[in-house]
Image: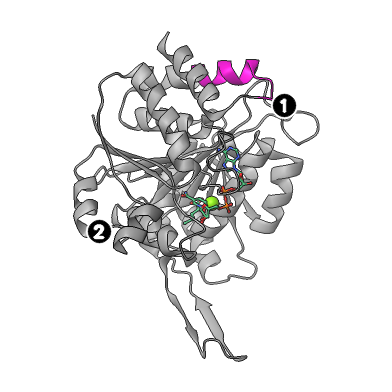
Amino acid sequence: MKLAVVPGDGIGIEVTEQALATLEAVLPGVDKTSYDLGAGRWHRTGEALPDSVLAELRQHDAILLGAVGDPSVPSGVLERGLLLRLRFELDHFVNLRPAKLYPGVATPLAGNPAIDFVVYREGTEGPYVGNGGALRKNTPHEIATEVSINTAFGVERVVRAAFEGAARRPRQHLTLVHKNNVLVYAGDLWFRTVRRVAEEYPAVTVAYHHVDAATIYLVTDPGRYDVIVTDNLFGDIITDLAAAVAGGIGLAASGNVNPTGTSPSMFEPVHGSAPDIAGQGKADPTAAILSVGMLLTHLGHDAEASRVEAAVAADLASRDSSSPGSTSEIGERIASAAAS
Ligand SMILES: NC(=O)C1=CN([C@@H]2O[C@H](COP(=O)(O)OP(=O)(O)OC[C@H]3O[C@@H](n4cnc5c(N)ncnc54)[C@H](O)[C@@H]3O)[C@@H](O)[C@H]2O)C=CC1
Ligand SMILES: CC(C)CC(=O)C(=O)O
Ligand SMILES: [Mg+2]
């Protein structure tokens, strides 16, 4: 396996170090190349992602990313110029985000509900494509636009991936989350696409929730979800909420997947660079470690992926949630459990 590693900024660097320790524990000797991308490079060179580096990243089997973004860099420069550019250039059209409440993990929800669902967030379109601008900037009459792009091609391919995923899960239930009562053009395209593709998957039951209602159910009754398919923006927002109800953002893993295999998929925690706790050893590396598990599954290392998940589950079951340990303490515990 040729692995590219992009630790990025803030706690991204701290959690990636721990994630790599667990990778080494289950699959020693992986050929890893670390790429210095993020705030430091941008300050030194003015570049977020040089073309030459992108070309090198393409030559790998997968990418492990920490997080990007730093208060010293204008908002959006690294998020758009590095992270989104990677997702778009490498055509990561499925942003896979599982939400699972592990035994022993405290949820803010009453009654300790069962939570085990996967969000298929579209990763290359929506309002994140940069189709916008500002007119009459810095005047009282400024007009800012950020137009969401939804193509039949782009919507269908993630919807198909979500149905495939739902068909492989025991409950075989898929929920489209959108806002088709207001976003009548984009919502209609998503709704019609789900209805059409559903005909090919008669065993999969289908539901539709407006995104505002979905935020209610994610808190009051998250057990109703199995597979959620949604657009880039809604998926971003509801997966932070999903992480919060499933034990915290420090546990939420993700994969930016190109299911065609024509470019490397990229695995990263759902969280960002968390400047508020960076450099303090407070970041939970579990999400980054579980992202390594997803990476291993993606590349067909199922046994090693199971060892990662089992080590995490065992650690979570025995953790004192009020005092889980420092970033390195958690990472070392999980890596040593995964090694044995
Ligand atoms: N995939 C990525 O690289 C992402 C990057 N960002 C960027 O990260 C920066 C900070 O963004 P925020 O909105 O504050 O989101 P964030 O996810 O970095 O932090 C939100 C809150 O969660 C906490 N948190 C995050 N990860 C944690 C962990 N592993 N353990 C314990 N607590 C954790 C933080 O301390 C903070 O209170 C910004 O520059 C943003 O653009 C944000 C989200 C995703
Ligand atoms: C920082 C953004 C570009 C992305 C984000 O928040 C996410 O993918 O969860
Ligand atoms: Mg996000």
Residue positioned 47% across, 35% down in the render: 15
Q: Quadrant of residue 21?
A: top left
- x%, y% of residue 237? 59, 53
What amino acid type should be assigned to the residue bearing mark 2?
A: Pro
From the Cβ of disc 1, is ligand 1 less than 8 Å away? no
Residue positioned 19% across, 47% down in the render: 56
Mark earlier in primary sequence (1, 2): 2
Residue ranking furthest to the top:
340
Residue ranking furthest to the right:
110
Q: CA distance from mark 1 to mark 2?
A: 42 Å
In the rendered image, is residue 201 in sight? no
Helix, strand or loop status at disc 1: loop
Q: From the viewer's perspective, is residue 219 above or below residue 142?
A: above
State the residue in front, 241 or 83: 83
**Relative horizontal placement of residue 112, taking residue 116 as reference (left or right):** right
- x%, y% of residue 188? 53, 66
In the rendered image, is residue 221 in sight? yes
- Number of callouts in the render? 2
- Label at residue 50: 2
Crowd rating for badge 1 (residues with CA inside 10 Å; few <14, some 14–19, many 20+) = few
Which residue range is magenta in the image?
Answer: 311-323
State the residue in front, 318 or 210: 318
| Residue behind mark 1 | 322
Residue positioned 33% across, 50% down in the render: 37
Q: Is residue 202 magenta?
A: no
**Relative horizontal placement of residue 130, taking residue 323 as reference (left or right):** left
Q: Is residue 316 magenta?
A: yes
- x%, y% of residue 97? 50, 41
- x%, y% of residue 176? 56, 52
**Relative horizontal placement of residue 258, taking residue 78 as reference (left or right):** left
Which image quarter holds the N terminus?
A: top left
Crowd rating for badge 2 (residues with CA inside 10 Å; few <14, some 14–19, many 20+) = few
